[in-house]
Amino acid sequence: MLPVNPSSDPAQQRLTQLRNALLSLHKILLDSERARYERDVARISSSGELLNLVLYDPWFAWLHELSELVVLIDETLDAKEPLNGIDAERLIVQARELVAPNENGAGFRKSYFEAMQNDPDAVLAHGKTRKLLSSLG
């Protein structure tokens, strides 16, 4: 995880906190999906095999949207141009919309809802992420 630099500007601090929370959520969801995959399909024998599945298998495809948001935040934090509050706010809004599970939705939001029905760790991670999002304004 990227450390929060106390001397950083507020927009950078907010995005770093968001990035870290989303990365933690992603790991929990990935672990949960791995367990389901191993239970329902086949054992995953190596981290290389897991990476290949995460990148190319439809089973894990729903996680790509969350992965892409984390990458976008990383790129924004690493950009040569100074970060502005508008960019930070846009990414925070995008995260809020993404981590809103929806039983009747599609894509990430529907699969996210299903993950929370199957794994208490996903529910706890969701709560932490939503709490952080609320604190970011």
Image: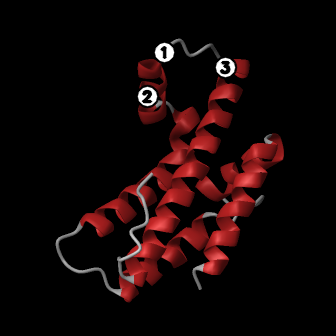
Kindly identify which numbered label has been placed on residue 38: 3
How many angstroms separate mark 1 from mark 2 (CA)?
A: 9 Å
Find numbered disc 3 in the image and state the secondary structure of the residue it sits on.
helix
Residue at position x 54%, y 69% from top? 95
The quarter of the picture where the C terminus appears is bottom right
Looking at the image, residue 134 sits to the left or right of residue 7; the answer is right
Work out whether mark 3 precedes mark 1 in sequence or the reverse, and give the earlier one. 3
Residue, disc 2: 51
Label 2 neighbourhood size at 10 Å, few (<14), some (14-19), many (20+)? few
How many angstroms separate mark 2 from mark 3 (CA)?
A: 14 Å
Looking at the image, residue 31 sits to the left or right of residue 56; the answer is right
Q: Amino acid at mark 3?
A: Glu
Q: Is residue 64 visible?
A: yes
Residue 116: percent from left, percent from top: 77, 49
Work out whether mark 2 precedes mark 3 in sequence or the reverse, and give the earlier one. 3
Residue at position x 81%, y 45% from top? 120
Residue 39: percent from left, percent from top: 73, 20
Q: Amino acid at mark 2?
A: Leu
Q: Is residue 113 visible?
A: no
Above or below: residue 31 compared with residue 39: below
Q: Amino acid at mark 1?
A: Ser
How many angstroms separate mark 3 from mark 1 (CA)?
A: 12 Å
Dots 1, 2 in contact, CB < 8 A: no
Residue 25: percent from left, percent from top: 61, 51
Find numbered disc 2 in the image and state the secondary structure of the residue it sits on.
helix
Name the mark nearer the viewer: 3 or 1. 1
Work out whether mark 1 precedes mark 2 in sequence or the reverse, and give the earlier one. 1
Taking depth in this image into account, of 107 and 27 the one nearest to the observer is 27
